[in-house]
Amino acid sequence: MTELETYSTIALYSGMIVYAIAFVFYVVDLANRSGDAELAAASPAAGVKAAAGGTTTLTKPRQKAPAAAPRSRWLRAGFALTVLGFALHLVATVLRGIAADRVPWANMYEFALTATVAVVGIFLIVQFFVDLRFLGTLVTGLTLVFLGVAKVNYYVEIVPLVPALDSYWLVIHIIVAVLAVGFFTLSFGLSILQLLQARRASYLKAGQTNSLAFMGGFPNQVRLEDLAYRLAIIGFAFWTFTLIAGSIWAEAAWSRYWGWDVKEVWTFIIWVLYAGFIHARATRGWRGTRSAWLNIVSYAAVIFNFSVVNVFFKGLHAYSGL
C-alpha cells in the first residue's frame, strides 16, 4: 500500500466516523419531531374555564418552550457534520485517484467511493435551491452502508487500468452515471416519505393521531411527490447520457455500440423504468402512491444493478477486480 493510499484510507475512515455521528443527530431530530407533534396534539391552543355563575371565560394557554429551536440545532449539527464528512470522503477519493494515477473507478471499491461521494455532494448542492436536510438520515445511512460493505468486501490494491477502461468516454460515462444515481437517491427518499405521509393521512382519518407523528414536521404528500418527480427528471437526463456515452465507449473498446451484455441490458432496463415513471405521471395522471411505488421500484433496479449485477453476473463489464 502506497503512502497516498494509506492517507486515503485514513481519510475514508475519518469521514465514515463523522457520517455516523451526523446520522445519530439526524435520528435525534426525527425523534424530536415525533415528540413535538405529540405534544402539540395533546395541548389545546386555548383552554376554556367554567366560572362560578355558569359563564365561561377563556384562559391563557399554557406556555411551553418552543420546540423548533432544539430540533433545528440537531438538524444544523447533523448537516454541518455531513459537510465535514463529505470533505474527508472527497479527500479519500481524490487521494485514491492520485495514488493510482488514473480516475478512481476501475473496480467496485473505487466506484463505491465515487458514487457515494456524488450522492452526498448532490445532497449538499441541492440545499442551495430547496431545503432537503430532512433526507440526511437516508443519505448518511446509505453512504455508511455502501462504504462499509465496499471497504470490507471489495477493497483491492491499486492496479493499472485494463485496456477497455483506458478511454475518456469511460470517464464521461461514469461521471454522468454517478450524478444520475445521486439525483435518483434523493428522489427515492422523497417517495419513501410520500408513502409515509399517505399512511399518516389514513391514520388521522381513523382518529389515530399518534401514529407516524414525526411526519407532521415534513412537507405534505403533494410537495414531496413534486420534488421526487423533478429530481427524477434530472437524474433521467443524466442516465440517458450514460447510455449514449456507454455506447460510444463500447464501440471504441469492442467495436460495437450494443452487444446485449448483462450490464448494458440492466442500464437500459433502468432507463425504461424511469421513462415509464416520468411518462405515467406526466401523461397518464399517475399520482399518489402508484407514482411513488414506481419510483421506488426504479431505484431498486439501480441498487440491483450495482450490488448484484456487478458482483454475480459475468460479462464484458466484469472488471471489478473481485
Image (cartoon, rainbow, N blue to C red):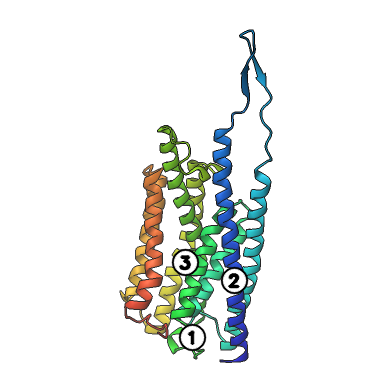
Discs 2/3, front: 2
Judge left or right: residue 248 versus residue 1. Answer: left
Identify the residue under disc 2: 17
Q: Residue at x 46, y 84 (%)?
A: 165
Mark 2 packing: few (<14 Cα in 10 Å), some, or many (20+)?
Answer: some
Identify the residue under disc 1: 166
Q: Amino acid at mark 3?
A: Phe
Judge left or right: residue 218 versus residue 279. Answer: right
Residue 11 horizontal/vertical position (percent): 62, 78
Cα gap from disc 2 to disc 3, whole angstroms:
35 Å
Outermost residue on the front side: it is: 52
Q: Quadrant of the N terminus?
A: bottom right
Give the image quarter of residue 92.
bottom right
Discs 1/2, front: 2
Residue 68 horizontal/vertical position (percent): 65, 44
Q: Amino acid at mark 1?
A: Asp
Identify the residue under disc 3: 241
